[in-house]
Image (cartoon, rainbow, N blue to C red):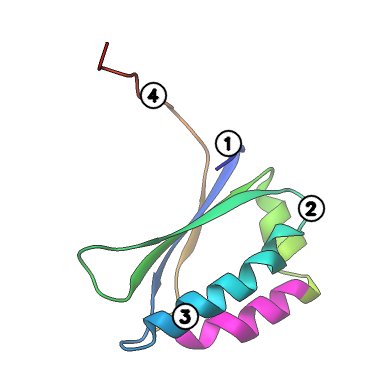
Amino acid sequence: MIAAPVLEAAYLQVRAGAETAFEQAFAEASPLIAVTTGYAGHTLQRCLEVPGRYLLLVQWQTQEAHTLGFRQSVQYQQWRALLHHFYDPFPVVEHFTTVLNHPCKDHTA
């Protein structure tokens, strides 16, 4: 993932039994967010401990690129139609900025 100043984070709880359909729909929806001005990359992670829980991380150049640029776009309406019916409860979305970034060093040498 490309480092950008703003990280959007959302826990997504998907209805039981809908995980495979959600992952397919998410793959279909991914190009919709990628065309947004200020978008810098995203990743979807599946939780190992909690069935149906995912973590969505999206890198943005600015918070407004997400809240105004994407959320007010035609692409967001398509994103919403593809994905929002999978969530129970609806996710909380928050934005973060880096305070400290400590890269991993290779300890094999």
Looking at this view, is 79 or 68 the one in front?
79
Disc 1: which residue: 3
User: Could you tell whether 14 is left or right of 60 in the image?
Assistant: left
The residue that appears at 49% across and 34% down in the rendered structure is 98
User: Could you tell whether 33 is left or right of 93 in the image?
Assistant: right
Above/below status of 36 relative to 73? above
**Secondary-structure class at tag 3:** helix
**Secondary-structure class at tag 1:** loop
Q: How far is disc 4 from disc 2 in space, using C-alphas? A: 28 Å
Using the image, tell me which numbered label, if any, was put on residue 37.
2
Q: Earlier in the sequence, mark 4 or mark 3?
A: 3
Label 1 CA crowd tier, 10 Å (few <14, some 14–19, many 20+): few
Disc 4: which residue: 102
Using the image, tell me which numbered label, if any, was put on residue 22.
3
Q: Name the front one of labels 4 and 3.
A: 3
Mark 3 is on which residue type?
Phe
Does the magenta-highlighted stretch encompass residue 80?
Answer: yes
Q: Name the front one of labels 3 and 2.
A: 3
Looking at this view, is 37 or 18 the one in front?
18
